[in-house]
Amino acid sequence: HNPSCRLCTLAHRHPSRRLTRFSSDQRATTAAPNGLARIETHGKKTKHENGVCHDDSATPVRAQTIDELHSLQRKRSAPTTPIKDGAASPFAAVLSEEERQKQQLQSISASLASLTRETGPKVVRGDPARKGEAAAKGAPSPQQQHHHHHHHIPPTISVSDSSLKFTHVLYNLSPAELYEQAIKYEKGSFITSTGALATLSGAKTGRSPRDKRVVKDEAAAQELWWGRGSPNIEMDEHTFLTNRERAVDYLNSLEKVFVNDQFLNWDTENRIKVRIISARAYHSLFMHNMCIRPTEEELESFGTPDFTIYNAGQFPCNRYTHYMTTSTSVDINLARREMVILGTQYAGEMKKGLFGVMHYLMPRRGILSLHSGCNMGNQGDVALFFGLSGTGKTTLSTDHNRLLIGDDEHCWSDSGVSNIEGGCYAKCIDLSQEKEPDIWNAIKFGTVLENVVFDEHTREVDYTDKSVTENTRAAYPIEYIPNAKIPCVGPHPKNVILLACDAFGVLPPVSKLNLAQTMYHFISGYTALVAGTEDGIKEPQATFSACFGAAFIMLHPTKYAAMLAEKMQKYGATGWLVNTGWSGGRYGVGKRIKLPYTRKIIDAIHSGELLTANYKKTEVFGLEIPTAIDGVPSEILDPINTWTDKSAYKETLLKLAGLFKKNFEVFAGYKMGGEGSLTDEILAAGPNF
């Protein structure tokens, strides 16, 4: 309706009348076959005094059905990446697109193969919910795809139901596609007000370290750390294969599975190809963010993965199986290069499981794997931040004045440092824009928010709400941090910072360490577990975790310590112990050291200010503490000054020293250096009382 057109106005007022506009040479002669006057719609447009009245019709869409119309909405991605600099991909040079996809599907089918059958399941690409769209586009049916892409060999035993069906593979989906899958099919998935995907991890909202198992074969028995203090709980090969079969059977029973082919380690000379097969879009998006995302060209030449994860976390393990103590089991087989997850949907199990694998693979190449954050200043000065969950490792390594190399997992090789991951996994409890703006701003489209609580109408997240768990998390690609260094590599570190959250309140806010002290505190790995970081932990408690990550290391802690000492000596790095925990009293009495003070301390380390500061030595631990730091109250630098009850301070100090000594007993008998000289030197660097 055009108000300026007299005819339109008349038609609007009298809809029952038949109104016809004729062109000037057809006014009395144009008629339709049924005798009624023909309405001219595509003739000459007639201009009126106050405007133009014309028809808005266009060429009809090229679709016969609504599904076909929907299929026109999305254009296909280019099948291959343009060759850069004339250098052809090793696969692209010899394989057609059809052959490449065929090999890719055969590789995925082989990954999903049962050990009792010669072949894997029949796999086809695409979402089973879009079968109608595929037909509308003229795409081959699953049977046709199977004919082209998978040569089936008859099984040697009876056929199972799962071998009679097709398993649809949703391969390396984009975040947008994974959002659609999660919201449509996974209960508890929502888009928050900032665009992040809020998800639930089910009954498990943290890792289950007591349910982690490692296959103890002949090689692993010799190489890995077993026994007291070790995180490696043994299982035999047969039990692993039983759990693997259970996971594979579950995944093959599904109509669709998600497959991610990605990389670990930004050092391209030492990167690892990983394949993650999962049943949830949440898990696929989480790993899309946390691993290094390959280009399409890199995917074309991906080939066979170096390591495979079977995440069947929605399905429990059989508790009557040998070595199983609960319905949850996270199993690693280093010989087969495989990991199986049953009975837990907590996505952090995949991330940390792969970290454990890197703790085994990298030292074999002479590369030190580290549970650390890492950033770099404008002058190329690199700092490593060691610390367990809740010590401030992610917060302190995310500094807008420095380039972020990574927040959690790194390698130190002869060429420098490199991030193992492609993303960040930040704690969200009590997150605020004021305190941590970079993390706050990274929570946007593409980010996975685990177990957070939000307003049901506005979808605004309440980061203070612990209704589901205190261990709320955000997983996002590292490029969401504005000052991330891409690629995530850097030169050799100048500072090695050991972070401890001291629940006893007796360690200084900062201490300069000599090499032996650095090794002692690195092996000790003292901190306090913050509530919720592991399944079952409710309140902070003092703990020791070798190498600030005993839950993930595979070899004896002294092997990592020896490598760290060698590299620090070779490249001239300085060690520091920073307490981000309590001051003025133990947990529940004193107060947490203010984050701005800790940041000032870290800044003084980066700038070199603390290298020239005046120091005094503390009693018992023999730590060198600075007498003054710009921007930090001098009275808090020596913890005894902040305690009103001095006798309570000394009593608590001796108690903590005793805990350190007791913890180190397990390492004291392990000989390092010529005739154990390094071991003796490290022991002497501990508390003396």
Image (tube, rainbow, N blue to C red):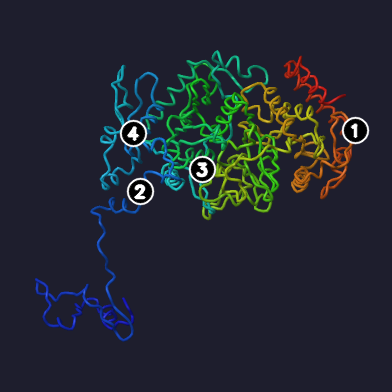
Q: Residues within 10 Å of mark 3 (few under 14, many from 20)?
A: many
First in sequence, mark 4 or 1: give its number: 4
Drawn side of residue 243 relative to residue 519, left or right: left
Q: Mark 4 or mark 1, which is nearer to you?
A: 4
Find residue 616 and report its horizontal and vertical position in percent.
Answer: 89, 36
Q: How many marks?
A: 4
Front-most of 450 and 44? Answer: 44
- Label disc, if present, on residue 647 of the rendered structure: 1
Front-most of 372 and 562? Answer: 562
Q: Secondary structure at mark 2?
A: loop
Measured along the vertical axis of the image, is residue 654 above or below residue 296? above
Measure the alpha-carbon separation of dots 1 and 2.
73 Å
Q: Secondary structure at mark 1?
A: helix
Measure the alpha-carbon separation of dots 4 and 1.
74 Å
Find residue 61 and report its horizontal and vertical position in percent.
Answer: 26, 59
First in sequence, mark 4 or 3: give its number: 4
Q: Mark 4 or mark 3, which is nearer to you?
A: 4
Measure the alpha-carbon separation of dots 2 and 3.
29 Å
Front-most of 501 and 272? Answer: 272
- Label disc, if present, on residue 102 of the rendered structure: 4
Q: Secondary structure at mark 4?
A: helix
Of all residues, the one furthest to the top in this rendering is 218
- Amino acid residing under circle 2: Arg
- Label disc, if present, on residue 199 of the rendered structure: 3
Give the quadrant of residue 154. Answer: top left
First in sequence, mark 1 or 2: give its number: 2
